[in-house]
Amino acid sequence: MTTLKNCRPMGGPATDLHIAGGRFAAEAAEGGEVIDCGGRILIPGLVEAHTHLDKSLLGMAWYRNEVGPRLIDKITNEREVKVSLGLDPQVQSERQAILSVSKGTTQIRSHVDVDTHHGLAGVEGVMATREKLSGLVDIEIVAFPQSSMMPRPGTVEMMDEALSLGADLVGGIDPCGIERDPKGHLDAVFALAEKHGKPIDIHLHEQDALGGFSMEEIIARTLAHGMQGKVTISHAFCLGMTNRAYAAELHARLAEAGIHIITTAPSAVPVPAVKELKAAGILTGSGSDGIRDTWGPFGNTDMLERAMFISQRNNLRRDDEVEMALDICTYGGAAIMETQGYGLNVGDRADCVLVEGEALAEAVAMRAPRKLVLKGGAVVARDGICVREAP
Amino acid sequence: MTTLKNCRPMGGPATDLHIAGGRFAAEAAEGGEVIDCGGRILIPGLVEAHTHLDKSLLGMAWYRNEVGPRLIDKITNEREVKVSLGLDPQVQSERQAILSVSKGTTQIRSHVDVDTHHGLAGVEGVMATREKLSGLVDIEIVAFPQSSMMPRPGTVEMMDEALSLGADLVGGIDPCGIERDPKGHLDAVFALAEKHGKPIDIHLHEQDALGGFSMEEIIARTLAHGMQGKVTISHAFCLGMTNRAYAAELHARLAEAGIHIITTAPSAVPVPAVKELKAAGILTGSGSDGIRDTWGPFGNTDMLERAMFISQRNNLRRDDEVEMALDICTYGGAAIMETQGYGLNVGDRADCVLVEGEALAEAVAMRAPRKLVLKGGAVVARDGICVREAP
């Protein structure tokens, strides 16, 4: 029973919002707490829809990166280094998730490595963190075959175990570029999804025509398995291809198959054009990807900053355009995660963030300080600091 | 007479550095102040080599951006809006420069608009700020024909006046794309440079073959006027062209003509590949470009963050690569500005920044807090706050 007094939902006129039973309510309850919001902007909780909680190096000694340039160099190096560094997926995921909460994120979809080298240690660690941080942040786990499934016998069985254990989604990775067996890989991914009745989120780094080919194969299986609305393609760099006619055809077919796109809007590779995705009716979310890991030193979990990256990468400068980028980092990700009661309307779950700034675009451009973060109506972070201390 | 005790120059082993007469000295003076650096990293002052001090909207009411998509839309809108908003170039440049100092920047090259609508108001305003902030930060002024010279009679004469008044460099802008008269524009720019004996810094947004053509014309005039080492091309988006053979040819010819490149590493357009520039022996610097202006809401003057953008845009992940990006934002820009005594060696001017972090790449990735900023040995900012308050 709380009243958020003098807040500005989505940067609009100042008003008072009431919370009861963890949800926004039409009227104030007797004797409830009143929080003076000082005219600050209120937005729904930020949505981290693509990250890797199990392998951040946050809080550990600085890792000097001397890794080779290819994707496979990074994958192989990481599999070894996780052992030599003694990385603990539970501790690391807790550190990253708490940092996320401090920045206003209220729900996370995390890919978690499943391979024959580390077994289910990653999934078990992140599941323990999910339990430990219950009430602070919601965590969804994708069983992710980072090291590939087809060339490494035993991985499919391990993926199956991870899904039985509690992973929420089936992950996948470059069917051609990494797996070298698009039919084998995608058949296995969709079979696991069908067996466990769980949705899919596939990493697709493949560019141009190669990525287009893999995407066509994903679309075909999504339709064949009746999985419309249950499949996400992360990265989807191929949609940034120069051949815009083929990209437009792919957009139309993705929309028809109800496939979602998650873009982290990196600046060094082609990326999906978010305005075109929106025009095609494709749900779009975003995420931080890896945070300070063996792949690179960057990342701070800030999804307001991610909205800035999306804006800059897509040359969005007008206020309405920057607001669209923020929408991807809030409503877009929440819709992809099928979050019930997401938003600032009466009846919605009171997951929200109070931020400084005159306008939404200013909050994004300045990556404005988070004054307060609420999860289910309870304060989980104040002035950029989470109420739970990181290990 | 100061000793920086227990600092780590460039992230190396801890040591004590002595300062006397505003410069690094071999020995400590009697009775000097001792600053405990707590093992933090010391780097030379960050160099902001491309910005627009005269037109930031920092500290003003939020400007809702509804501007059209073309370059010319932004130029025309800005010329009008500067009047309707009552923008004061002196106040705005002071605000931005003080923010820069707080983030560890010790020298700035600023393009300043010169046009027949606003006359020399911009140059006069930034010159007043330069005077006012003398000792805090060095400011170099480029007389910049933002609204074009050739299609707007009277602009060349105004540029001439700006250079007589005290502007340090001759600016230029897309000879084809904006000026629509490459011969006329570049002849005028080089004639002004010759008359005033001043260097040149030209904005070149033109992409692909068009930018290549303009670049060839700049190279030809640089050689003809014997201006090797005195010409900078800012942005140079054309060097990000798909035709890498032609780009390599341009790199070789730029190096031969001693032309420097300044890249802000934006993510929505092609950009010069900084590793290739380095391999070709081309001096490279960087800058923030516009800070929260009518062109867009982004920018915070942080040149450590700019090093991160350069890294991300060029896919630099290894520690040695990220260090190269930082080098562009320090030594690269300083060399282009022909700064004497720049660095951390004995005899160098004590312009430096103390930053948190274990390693240089960490300082860049985390955009680490600036504990202390020194200019000529004097403390000009502490814990991210400039000793001078912004107006």
Image (cartoon, coloured by chain):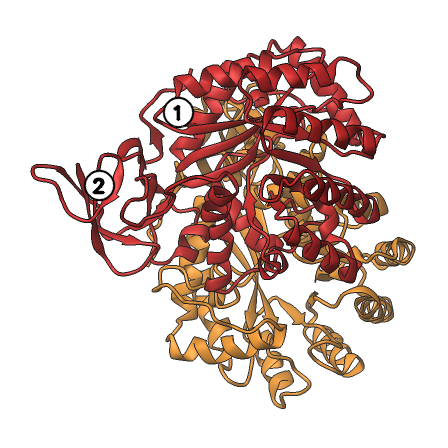
Chain colours: A red, B orange
Label for residue A19?
A: 2
* Amino acid type for the residue under numbered disc 1: Gly
Give the amino acid at mark 2.
Ile
Sort mark 2 into few (<14), some (14-19) or many (20+) by Cα contacts within 10 Å.
many
Which residue extends farthest bottom?
B153
Seen in the image, is A240 located left or right of residue B358?
Answer: right
Mark 2: secondary structure:
strand
Residue A155 visible in image = yes
Query: CB of mark 1 within 8 Å of CB of mark 2?
Result: no
Q: Chain of mark 2?
A: A
Q: Nearer the viewer, mark 1 or mark 2?
A: 2
Q: Secondary structure at mark 1?
A: loop
Q: Is residue B194 above or below residue A68?
A: below
Look at the image and tell me in which quarter the N terminus of chain A lies: top left
The one nearer the camera, A98 or A24, is A24
Q: Residues within 10 Å of mark 1 (few under 14, many from 20)?
A: few
Relative depth, front residue between A66 and A264: A264
Q: Chain of mark 1?
A: B
Alpha carbon separation for disc pair 1 and 2: 62 Å
Q: Residue at x 71, y 41 (%)?
A: A224
Residue on which the image places disc 1: B31
